[in-house]
């Protein structure tokens, strides 16, 4: 019974992770500017790959599950910071916002610098 439950949970995490990866790629292709695309791309390693790696806890041997958990934790901690730094560098280089953007909250800081 426990083995069946572990397989169901592991398979669910695998399907959810795959769905987040597909949605992240779709968002990267459809969103209008660099900053929105960066947000969509960040979903892939954080939620997509993280869920796939967590599925290793239930579907693989314990040693692989622990490695998957450690890798998922590393991605969860470092991914958002890296995305923020890339977006900040793009902004400082003058990559334009989408024409649908309503406001630019960082424009004041950019003029002061």
Image: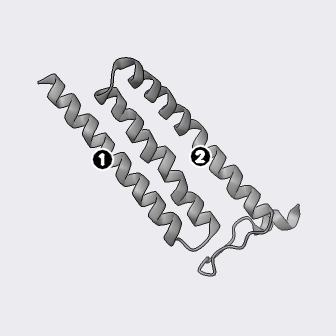
The answer to whether 79 is drawn above or below residue 109 in the figure is above
Of 59 and 88, nearer the camera is 59
The answer to whether 15 is drawn above or below residue 66 in the figure is below
Of 110 and 26, nearer the camera is 26
Which residue is at the far left? 1
Task: Provide residue 112's location: percent of width, then percent of height.
Answer: 87, 63
Neighbour tally class for label 1: few under 14, some 14-19, many 20 plus, Cα within 10 Å:
some
For the point 88% across and 61% down, which residue is it? 113
* In-image side of 110 versus 86 (left or right): right
For the point 24% across and 35% down, which residue is it? 9
Residue bearing the label numbered 2: 80
Query: Within the image, what quadrant is residue 107 found in?
Result: bottom right
Q: Are marks 2 and 1 in contact (CB under 8 Å)?
A: no
User: Of marks 2 and 1, which one's residue comes earlier in the chain?
Assistant: 1
Task: Provide residue 57's location: percent of width, then percent of height.
Answer: 34, 27
Query: Within the image, what quadrant is residue 97 found in?
Result: bottom right
Q: Of circles 2 and 1, which is in front?
A: 1
How far apart are labels 2 and 1 at the CA level? 23 Å
Mark 1: secondary structure = helix
Q: Which label was assigned to residue 15? A: 1
For the point 49% across and 26% down, which residue is it? 70
Task: Provide residue 7's location: percent of width, then percent of height.
Answer: 21, 32
Task: Provide residue 83's location: percent of width, then percent of height.
Answer: 63, 51
Query: Within the image, what quadrant is residue 8 found in?
Result: top left
* In-image side of 95 versus 9 (left or right): right
How many numbered callouts? Answer: 2
């Amino acid at each position: 019974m426990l083995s069946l439950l572990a397989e169901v949970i592991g398979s669910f995490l695998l399907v959810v992770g795959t769905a987040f990866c597909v949605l992240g790629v779709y968002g990267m292709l459809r969103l209008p500017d660099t900053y929105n695309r960066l947000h969509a791309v960040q979903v892939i390693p954080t939620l997509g790959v993280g869920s796939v790696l967590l599925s290793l806890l239930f579907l693989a041997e314990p040693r692989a599950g622990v490695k998957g958990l450690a890798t998922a934790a590393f991605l969860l901690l470092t991914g958002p910071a890296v995305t923020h730094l890339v977006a900040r560098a793009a902004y400082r280089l003058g990559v334009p916002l989408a024409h649908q953007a309503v406001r630019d909250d960082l424009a004041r800081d950019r003029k002061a610098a």
